[in-house]
Amino acid sequence: MGPPELMSTESSVVVRWSVVVVGVYLLQVGFANDLQILGVHPELMLLVAISAGLVGGSSRGAVVGFAAGLLVDLLYSGSLGVSALCFTLVGFAVGAAEDSVIRSTKVISMGIAVGASATGVLLFAGVTQLLGGHTLTDPQLWRIVGIVAVLNGLLCPALLPLCRWAEGLGLKSRAY
């Protein structure tokens, strides 16, 4: 057990991240699933995992990615745990990549979000294929990858301030 003020800080971070994850989940279910471009909607929960990695590092990206992915798995029928696994890996990788960047900018964060979103969709398709699906042979896969990557890249700057707040860094802790 740590000092009481440290435990209080840790519990408030958990509460703030829970608010962000559940809030974005409600946006995904209530709004984003209906916002489609060529039949493809943004994957806001994947973007939460990516943003958590950008703001909080690899361990935060993995934990938030797992929680966000598990909520997605509960929403859609299919193999429970596939989204949780993929979002965990992507959130961790983004956090590790962010740790290696000396000074992150808005453009770098958007670029990381684009690449990580494409990777997350492809990883999901690959794991689903291993479990007996036909996702890698879907003729729409590359359209889905491209649209999700671009949409999440564009939405990333809107989500990062909320994630900084959840991490306890304040809304304006970075230069952008």
Image (cartoon, helix red, strand yellow):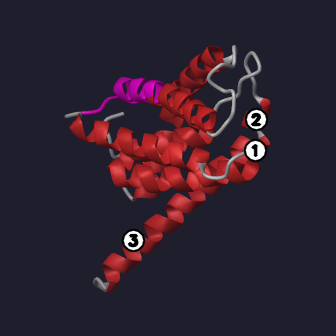
Circle 2/circle 1 CB separation < 8 Å: yes
Closer-to-camera residue (114/119): 119
Q: Is residue 117 placed above or below 29 in the rendered structure?
A: above
Amino acid on which disc 3 is placed: Glu
- Say which residue label 1 marks: 29
Q: Position of residue 7 (x, y in %)?
A: 37, 79
What separation in Å lies between label 2 and label 1 (alpha carbons)? 6 Å
Amino acid on which disc 1 is placed: Val
Residue beneath the point at 44% across and 25% down: 115
What mark, if any, has residue 10 been given in the picture?
3
Residue beneath the point at 62% across and 23% down: 136
Residue beneath the point at 23% across and 33% down: 101
Closer-to-camera residue (73/6): 73
User: Element under label 1?
Assistant: helix
What mark, if any, has residue 33 been given in the picture?
2
Closer to the N terminus: mark 3 or mark 1?
3
What separation in Å lies between label 3 and label 1 (alpha carbons)? 28 Å
Left-right relation of 145 to 103: right
Left-right relation of 111 to 68: left
User: Is disc 1 surrounded by few (<14), some (14 to 19) or many (20+) residues within 10 Å?
Assistant: few
| Magenta stretch, overall SS | helix
What separation in Å lies between label 3 and label 2 (alpha carbons)? 32 Å
Residue beneath the point at 33% across and 80% down: 5
User: Element under label 2?
Assistant: helix
Magenta residues?
103-115
What mark, if any, has residue 135 been given in the picture?
none
Q: Quadrant of residue 132?
A: top right
Q: Is residue 106 part of the magenta span, yes or no?
A: yes
User: Is disc 2 surrounded by few (<14), some (14 to 19) or many (20+) residues within 10 Å?
Assistant: some
